[in-house]
Image: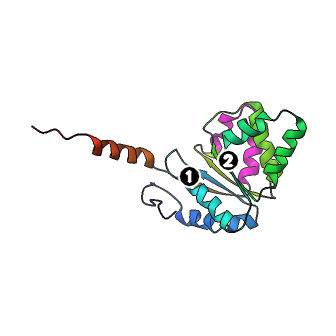
């Protein structure tokens, strides 16, 4: 976090971010949801929370939503194998899921995410990053009932940190592009 440009976002709850880095939410099995458009540092903040958790001796898993739902859980070929993987994700001290909302989910993926969240509910913390406000999550899930239940379990005990502004990565790329243009001499 020492490299994080706190002045770049138009809005960020710095005390809220710093509180999550102290890991107080873990003892109460609370969740952290980082909401921002791409390029504003939500993954970096989540990685720093994860790093702090490891340094404090917590077991941790950090996965993108695609890795978790499509590549791992969605590829299980048996009910027994799926059950073992769901129990694995339910039992880790902290589970960070990055990039919720970047992809639309089919019914199976939505059900799998719901299973992971339900098995952790009020027992283990989650750190989630998303480019969509939680109120828009129903747009990425095909089943409104699953989306509503998932949202309810995630936000009931959650610190929701919203970051607003323009993409930092875009700013860096534009600055780099401007500095690499040859100057014209007459």
Residue, disc 1 = 42
**In the image, residue 157 lies at what x, y percent?**
73, 58
**In the image, residue 67 lies at what x, y percent?**
68, 41
Looking at the magenta stretch, what is its main secondary structure? Answer: helix
SS class of the residue under badge 2?
Answer: strand
Image quarter (top left, top right, bottom left or bottom right) of the C terminus: top left
Which residue is at a point 66% across and 67% down the rendered structure image? 55
**Cα distance between the residues tagged 2 and 1:** 14 Å
Mark nearer the viewer, 2 or 1: 2
Which residue is at a point 81% across and 48% down the rendered structure image? 118
Mark positioned earlier in the residue sequence (2 or 1):
1
Image position of 12 (left or right of 59) = left
Residue nearer the viewer, 40 or 152 = 40
**In the image, residue 44 lies at what x, y percent?**
55, 54
Asked whether 145 falls inside the magenta stretch, the response is: yes
When asked about the image quadrant of residue 136, the answer is top right
Q: Which residues are magenta?
A: 135-157
């Amino acid at each position: 976090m020492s490299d994080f440009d706190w002045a770049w976002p138009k809005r960020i709850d710095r005390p809220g971010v710093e509180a999550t880095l102290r890991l107080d939410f873990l003892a109460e099995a609370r969740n952290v949801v980082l909401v921002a458009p791409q390029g504003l540092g939500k993954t970096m903040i989540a990685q720093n929370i994860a790093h702090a958790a490891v340094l404090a001796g917590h077991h941790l898993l950090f996965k993108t939503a695609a890795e978790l739902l499509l590549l791992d859980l969605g590829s299980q070929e048996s009910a027994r194998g799926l059950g073992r993987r769901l129990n694995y994700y339910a039992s880790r001290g902290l589970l960070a899921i990055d990039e919720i909302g970047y992809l639309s989910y089919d019914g199976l993926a939505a059900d799998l995410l719901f299973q992971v969240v339900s098995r952790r509910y009020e027992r283990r913390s989650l750190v989630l990053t998303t480019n969509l406000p939680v109120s828009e999550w129903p747009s990425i899930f095909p089943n409104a009932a699953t989306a509503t239940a998932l949202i309810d379990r995630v936000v009931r005990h959650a610190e929701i940190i919203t970051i607003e502004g323009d993409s930092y990565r875009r700013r860096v790329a534009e600055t780099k592009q401007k500095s690499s243009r040859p100057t014209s001499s007459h």
